[in-house]
Each structure stands twice: as C-alpha cells, then as structure tokens.
Amino acid sequence: METLGGLLTQALHLVLVLVGAPLVLGCTRWLKARMMGRRGASPWQPVRDFAKLLRKRPVLAENASAVSEVAPFVAVVATLVALALVPSFALGMAFAPLGDLLLVAGLLALARVALALAGMDVGTAFGGLGAAREMSFAAFAEPALLVSVLSFAILAGTTNLDLVAATFRDGQLGLRVSLALAGIAMLAVAVAENARIPVDNPSTHLELTMVHEAMLLEASGRHLALWEFQAALKLELWLALLAAVFLPFGAAPAGAGPLAWALGLLAWLAKMAGFTLALASFESAIAKMRVFRVPEFLGAALLLALLAAALLFVSTGLA
C-alpha cells in the first residue's frame, strides 16, 4: 500500500510541477509589473507563448550541428528529472531514495553545459561570449551550492532530500547560525542561477544580452519553446528546493493518506506563492548590477557557505 501511495504521489507531483512551472514564471512577471505600476501580462501568458512557439518549426544555421537540435531536449529532461527528485506536498514519493542533493546539483550542471554548448555550436561571437560568462558564473555558483549541501549533510547526516526535510521538520537541529549562512548562500545562488539579477550596462545595454539571452539568439520555434520551458522549470526547481529544505513544514509524511496530501498541497502552494512574491519584490527593489559584479555576488555566497561549513566543523569537533 505504501508503494502504491509513493507512485501516486510521484505522479501527482510530476503533473503539479509541469502545470506550475509556467504559472510561477507568469506570476513573478505579473507581480513585478504591478509593483512597478504597470498592468502586466496575464500569469498564464507563458503558456500561450510556449504553445505559439511549439507550433513553429525551428530555423537552424547552415553550420549548426546536431548539438543545436539535441541540447534543448537534454536540458529540459535533466531539469525535469531534478525537479521530480525534489519533494513538494508529500514525502516518501517513489523517487525519494534517488532524491540526493548532489544528484540534483549534477543534473543542473548537465542542463547548464547543454545550454553553453548550444550557444557555442553555431560559432557566433555573442553565443560564445554568453557561454563563457555562463560557465565563469558557474565556477562560483556550483561550489557555493555544494558547500551548502555539505553543511546539510553534516547537520542531517545525509544528503537525501527527504531525510533532510524530515530532520528539519522534526526540529531536531534547532536554530543554528551555520544553517542561516548556508540558507543565505543558497538564496544567492538561486537568484543568480535563474538570471534574476538585473544586469545591464547603462551605456550600451548589451551586457544582459551577452550573459544569458546571447546563447539563445540562434534558437527559434519549438527549440526556443523548450529553452524557455526549461528556464521556467529551473525557477520552479529552485523555489521548491528552498521550500523543501528550509520550510518543510506541512508536507505529508511518508505513507500518509489523501487528507494529508491535500493539506500538504495547500502548504506547498502557500510556500511557493510566498517565494514568488519575495522574488518579485526583490527584482523590483534592487538596482541594476554591472555584469562584472555578478562573480563578486556569487563569491560572497561561496564565502558564506564556507563559513557555515567551518562553523559546523568547529562545533562538531568541540561537541
């Protein structure tokens, strides 16, 4: 019976994240527009955009290889698999034994490499520059994420997401400065990984294009739809990951029934709505950042994660 419940919750989780990804992106854009005094597009506008692009055939450059055709599918599948491993409204889903934080980080790295290869495949200057900067940012973002995972592993004794969430939910760890530092580091990485930092050059207005959109200049049609959907999935993944690790309260325990699932679903929707509102508020309030400040931003996140791990090692050694 527990196996059947795990399969059912896993299927419901996949349906939930597939439907919720464009809605999270649309709500973030709509809230940001309202905060800036604009009407804003409907929260369902990304769904219409995806549907419109999926009906169009992609146009490839003459010197494009198979990488340009395969990379969007690899990125979407890797991100979707990672999202399937992150618990949402219930613990103990079918993929829970595989839900390791290191595996999630590896799948995100695979999606990033696919994006960078797609940007460099055609050989344009913008694509190569965007890919180079994307990987240079990853040199700070990935270590910060992995060191934060190390902190969770020291505290919970495991890197499995279900076990980490259960440990934090039961309150066995209490309030720790190291946990707060690791949380701030993960928040910074989440903001940077989803290109939510406003980056611009006031004189040329080209630096934003050179960072992320530059790698997608050659994408069109359903390939562009897949890249946009992958970005929406990644945004939802990071919000769900933060909710699972730092706000695991309300999630239905393993082996629970439909009533606990319904309560867990309401709690998860409330947490995602809160994160969406916080992200829109952050984007509306923060000033634009020069592109060379982004590595410094991620470097600060890495230092916070290292400080959290160092504090944990010291406290563990003294215990």
Image (spheres, rainbow, N blue to C red):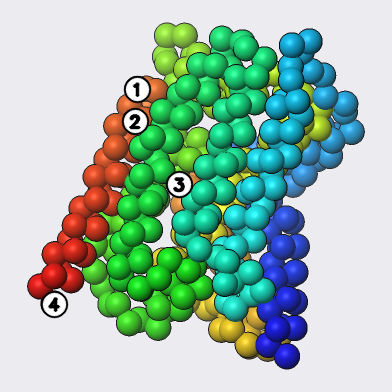
Q: Which residue is mark 4?
A: 319
Check contact, mark 1 vs mark 2: CB within 8 A: yes
Of residue 197 and residue 318, the one placed in the foreground of this image is 318
Query: Position of 17 compared to 238: left or right?
Result: right
Q: Residues within 10 Å of mark 1 (few under 14, many from 20)?
A: few
Q: Quadrant of residue 99?
A: bottom right
Q: Which residue is mark 3?
A: 190
Amino acid type of disc 1? Phe
- Earlier in the chain: of badge 1 and badge 4, it is 1
Please determine whether, in this image, residue 201 is positioned above or below residue 105.
above
- Earlier in the chain: of badge 3 and badge 1, it is 3
Q: Which residue is mark 2?
A: 295
Q: Residues within 10 Å of mark 4 (few under 14, many from 20)?
A: few
Q: Answer yes or no: is residue 283 visible.
A: no
Callout 3: helix, strand or loop?
helix
Q: Answer yes or no: is residue 213 visible.
A: yes
Please determine whether, in this image, residue 232 is positioned above or below residue 307.
above
Q: CA distance from mark 1 to mark 4?
A: 42 Å
Count of labels in the image: 4
Q: Which residue is mark 1?
A: 292
Check contact, mark 1 vs mark 4: CB within 8 A: no
Residue at 34% across / 30% down in the picture? 295
Callout 4: helix, strand or loop?
loop
Q: Residues within 10 Å of mark 2 (few under 14, many from 20)?
A: some
Check contact, mark 4 vs mark 2: CB within 8 A: no
Residue at 27% across / 40% down in the picture? 300
Q: Position of residue 76 (x, y in %)?
A: 69, 44
Residue reaching furthest left?
318
Amino acid type of disc 4? Ala
- Earlier in the chain: of badge 4 and badge 3, it is 3
